[in-house]
Every structure is written in C-alpha cells, then in structure tokens.
Image: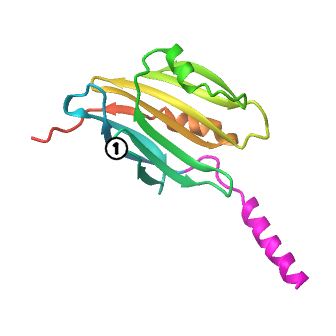
Amino acid sequence: MKARLTLVVMILGSALAWPQSLSPELEDVKNTIAGVGAAGGKVGYTIRVPKGAYLIRTGEWRDLYSSRHDAFVSWKVQIETSPVRTLEAALKDATPSSRTVKPEASAIEGGLQVVRRPTSDSVVDASVWTYKVGELGGVRAQCSGPAKALDALVAMCATLQVVPVPSAH
C-alpha cells in the first residue's frame, strides 16, 4: 500500500512541477461588448489571447478568455467597457487595496497601461491592465497569468484595439 501511495505522490508531484511555457502561443480574437454612449450600444475590440482559451461571456459589458497554465495559475484576459481616460484614473482603477503588487502606470501607443508588479517572490500571479479609447467608447483589458511571465502579459495586453462595429444594415 505504501508503494502505491508513493507512486501516486510522485506522479502528481511531477505533473504539478511540469515545466510550462511562459510565452503562450497566441491567437487573435474579435468581439463586441456593450459600450457607454456608443452608437448602436456596441464597442468592438480585438486582442491576442492564449491559443485555445475559452470565452466566458459574463454580461453585456464583459468577456473573459481563460486557459489553464498549471495547477496554480491560469492565463486570463478580461475585456470590459471603461470610463478611464487619464493616467491618474488608470492608476487609481488598477491599484488594489492589498500590498501584494506595485502598480506602474505608463502611456502606450493609443492608450494607457498599468503593470501590477508583484512585491514578493511568493506571489505566483501578476496582471497588466490596458486601456484604449475609440470613437465608440473605452475598453479595458485585464491580462493575468504567471508572475514570471510578466513580459508576456505586457505584450499580450498591449495588443488590445478598439475597432468599428459592422452595421446591422
């Protein structure tokens, strides 16, 4: 019995420790969410998400793409409408009440980005928030995943674009 238990522990332990890529293969997604003040009520977006991520539509204003990384962390990209238009507002919006991350805000091409850098090696996940504004409204992407993949999260979230919604006519 002890030998079987040891074997199970070894198999489970190796599965949890299996090396996972810190730069997932990405694919383009395009969708629409409800916008604030948008013509026709919709804002279109495109972004690159981990290949094979599944979409969970969590309301008219939010889409969530998720893909498992390992037993502890998943790659997640959440898209939602946002009223944020300034760097100060982006920093305030993305700053958590806990002290496990240090937010760093910057202007990027066509928008704003806040990197929520972990303050300790014990934090296993990290997130990046990107804000883009188009003629039809503002959109925020929250990209989260392994803390060691912060550069991949920054690059993935920076692909967010606000795009025109095709007319129904």
Magenta highlight range: 1-24
* Count of numbered circles on the image: 1
Question: Where does residue 50 sit, x and y in percent of width and height?
Answer: 51, 50
Residue type, mark 1 in image? Lys
Q: Residue at (73%, 61%) from the top-left corner?
A: 16
Q: Quadrant of residue 3?
A: bottom right
Does residue 95 lie above or below 58 as drawn? above
Check disc 1 and report its element: helix, strand or loop: strand
Q: Residue at (74%, 40%) from the top-left corner?
A: 123
Asked whether residue 104 is in view, the answer is yes
Quarter of the image where the C terminus is located: top left
Does residue 69 lie above or below 149 as drawn? below
Question: Badge 1 is on which residue?
Answer: 30
Asked whether residue 26 is in view, the answer is no
Asked if residue 155 is among those painted magenta in the image, a careful observer would answer no
Question: Where does residue 147 sit, x and y in percent of width and height?
Answer: 68, 40
Q: Main secondary structure of the magenta part?
A: helix
Q: Quadrant of residue 54?
A: bottom left
Left or right of 145 on screen, residue 54: left
Question: Where does residue 53 sit, x and y in percent of width and height?
Answer: 48, 54
Q: Residue furthest left?
A: 169
Left or right of 73 on screen, residue 140: left
Q: Residue at (82%, 71%) from the top-left corner?
A: 10
User: 93 or 134, which lies in front?
Assistant: 93
Characterize the local packing of mark 1: few (<14), some (14-19) or many (20 or more) Cα atoms within 10 angstroms. few
